Image (cartoon, helix red, strand yellow):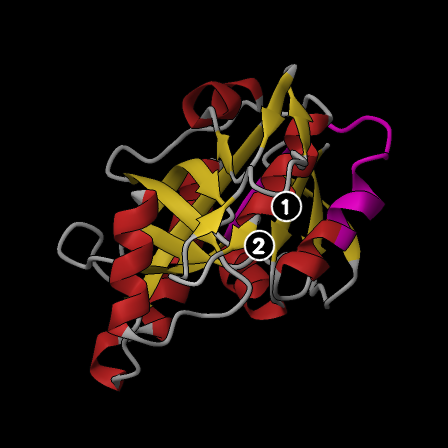
Amino acid sequence: MIIVATATSKEMKASFGFADAPAVEQGESVEFTLNGRELLLTVTGVGLVNAAMAAGRLLGRPGLTGMVNLGIAGAYEVIEFPVGSTCYVWRETWPEYGLLDEDGRVDPKAIGFAQGNVGGNPVWDKLKLNPTKDTERMGLELGATWLRASSTTVGSVTGTPERSGWLKTSYGADIENMEGFPLAFGAMQQGLPFLEVRTISNLVGSRYAKEWDLKGAFSALGTATAELFK
């Protein structure tokens, strides 16, 4: 059984509307069969804390074969990652873990405690994912036109161009989300394949309506999910 996690019920509905999947509310997990695959549809709630709690509840279940995180995200540069495009994540970063200095920089090793281990290696603020291999392990298929992205998982949505530019430059980030890191960390600690797929809804740091398209991102999410689970 593959866990399919979204942050919100809107993202879940957008993802599986084509398949007439059952409604799932925050905190719920519903079993669903799609094209012969047993899925556990889960709505975690928004943010790192909700995502971590959901991972803790679910990853001890027997018979799991992987986890897929679906959702929308912002892009730090919409020329490279246009609004409405679909991407899969090869690296997750939690840029807020560590010691914050007077210049606003965060040193993940300064407090002396790694978050844990994956594959015998300490995890500080970054996780290198294996999207191509893990997609194959789950019997799924990446879209031919999907973009490969490095993602940051943040506790608060970036609301200024200055902060957006700093995150992009400091962490080599392409997109921003609020749940990917804890879900990936939990799955990888259990030795399960993990895949994060995001559709781009906005330019990070901009509050101008013209640089947002939630409806388009939700529509693209349904198209991407159908392609992934075909």
Could you tell me which secondary element the residue under label 1 belongs to? helix
Q: Is residue 141 above or below residue 57?
A: above
Residue 22 forms part of the magenta stretch: no
- 181 and 40: which one is in front? 181
Q: Give percent across and percent down for residue 222.
A: 44, 56
> Would residue 56 be found to the left or right of residue 91 on screen?
right
Quarter in which the N terminus is drawn: top right
* Residue 43 seen by the camera: no
The residue shown at (41%, 23%) is 132
Packing grade of label 1 (10 A; few <14, some 14-19, many >=20) is many
The residue shown at (47%, 18%) is 133
Q: Give percent across and percent down for residue 127.
A: 51, 33
> Would residue 78 be found to the left or right of residue 167 on screen?
left
**Residue marked by disc 1:** 182
What numbered label is drawn on residue 127? Answer: none
The extreme top residue here reads: 120
- 200 and 205: which one is in front? 205
**Residue marked by disc 2:** 179
* Residue 140 seen by the camera: yes
The extreme front residue here reads: 102
> Would residue 130 be found to the left or right of residue 213 on screen?
right
Label 1 – label 2 distance at C-alpha = 6 Å
- 130 and 146: which one is in front? 130
Q: Give percent across and percent down for residue 97.
A: 57, 49
- 30 and 155: which one is in front? 155
Looking at the rendering, the stretch of residues picked out in magenta corresponds to: 53-70
Question: Badges 1 and 2: C-beta atoms under 8 Å apart?
Answer: yes
Packing grade of label 2 (10 A; few <14, some 14-19, many >=20) is many
Q: Is residue 7 above or below residue 118?
A: below
